[in-house]
Image (cartoon, rainbow, N blue to C red):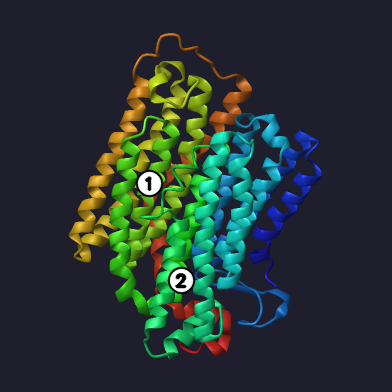
Amino acid sequence: MNVLLVLPLLVPLATAVAGILLLRVPRAARAASALGAAGLLAASIALLSATLDGTILVTQAGAWPAPFGITLVADRFAAAMVVVGAVLLAAVVASSVRGLDAARERAGFHPLVHALAMGVSGAFLTGDLFNLYVWFEVMLMSSFVLVSLGGEREQLTGGLRYVVLNLVSSALFLAGAGLLYGTVGTLNMADAAVALRAMPAQGTTSVVAALFLLAFGIKAAAFPLFFWLPASYHTPPMPIAALFAGLLTKVGVYALVRTGTLVFDRDRAFTDPLLLAVAALTMVTGVLGAMAQTDVRKVLSFHIVSQIGYMLMGLGLGTRLALAGTVFYVLHHIVVKGNLFLVAGVIRRVGGSFSLDRLGGLLTRSPLLAAAFLVPALSLAGLPPLSGFWAKYLLVRAGLEAGHGAIVGVALAVSLLTLFSMTKIWAEAFWKPAPEGSDPAPLGAGERLSLLGPVLALGAVTVAIGLGAGVLFRFADAAAAQLLEPGLYVRAVLGARGGGG
């Protein structure tokens, strides 16, 4: 068994168990949580290092050969997703020291976030569709408790919408998996890919592909079933919301990329035009929803929806450059969006509200907070030289090269509207004078370290990606090339049985 593939699951599992045992000792629980987050980050970096040369790592649980056993697989894309997820987890755990109230901490925050991290890592590393469903359910259970942690009315209302739509998605996923198993007799992704290529084209496979597209599209918060996200992501404390915003929808995008390039790559004539239409509508509806909001959390929640459209655009275009753009965009967005939600928590702490009508004067009150907001906000809007500019540049260039001027026009227009809504937050919260009667609440020394430290660190990652964009582009291009050669994945998993893939 390859230990590098197992550690990203065992480390958060062990940390979650330790967190449960230490619930009544908050300081020890925090220490265990921080140690677990650091351990996951180290394990994920080791995993990524082993895949950088193009090696696809595979292990079979219990030594059962594929497709009969539980398969774990890591290529460049999967390993990078585990790493960036671990980076965000570390920032969230650090921020929670002062950004989360003691009652929620005692109610199980630390074990729950590590259970969520285990589910996310499992979804990225599984080579089997049934186990992908299992990992989705692990994420759903832990995330539902997290979104409701505290039991406030707004949280319970948002959590109900969250869980209902995600259960619908899970039901569609299970139905698609059942139809696929009935068609090819396997749910191992590599084995299913081989079986589908050996079959003549038929309508059943298109139906199965559509079911998976719908199921994963709901989890990714794509148009039209995205409304559960802005109704729920603004309700929990910001460390929890940051983890959700950065990771959960990206698992849906990852699943779309993985199945679209490996299992259902023969259905691209059916799925690609549909994906491009969904991408455009997701971008537009998300950014228009953001522009209509006056609550910082809701603005950022709608922008999650909008940015998912860019990721789907690259998958729908289907070229190597476009897929590299999607890989680049997903990795950059996990950092930027998680950071913006953490910044929103600090805005609430310093300014006393999430409402733009009640905020003001934060530029003079906390210049460091202003800088911490400006970097991810401008990156989200796609201004050079930050990471978001290069991510959008790759997608725009890929769209023009593929002759899809309409989707490029939508992407550019939405980018301008994103800049407008980020400018609105800046003008209302930071630039205008503080409203009369507002009570400044400067950060203490400990709070500056715990609350501003993680957001400044994530901001530094964003700047580093922008200034060193060539390095990440070369990685994203290599990952895209690997995704577009499914035979490599098939042979790694099935060995000689994979044949030519």
Where does the image place residue 39, in percent across and percent down from the top left? 68, 51
Q: Which residue is mark 1?
A: 387
Q: Secondary structure at mark 2?
A: helix
Closest to the observer, 374 or 280: 280
Tell me the crowding category of disc 2: few under 14, some 14 to 19, or many 20 or more residues within 10 angstroms, Cα based.
some
Tell me the crowding category of disc 1: few under 14, some 14 to 19, or many 20 or more residues within 10 angstroms, Cα based.
many
In the rendered image, is residue 445 in sight?
A: yes
Where does the image place residue 75, in percent across and percent down from the top left? 52, 68
Extreme residue toward the top, this view:
437
State the residue at coordinates (55%, 62%).
124
State the residue at coordinates (60%, 19%).
444
**Vertical order, 415 against 75 (above or below):** above
Mark drawn on residue 27? none
Closest to the observer, 137 or 2: 137
In the rendered image, is residue 490 in sight?
A: no
Q: Which residue is mark 2?
A: 259
Which of the image's four quarters has the N terminus? bottom right
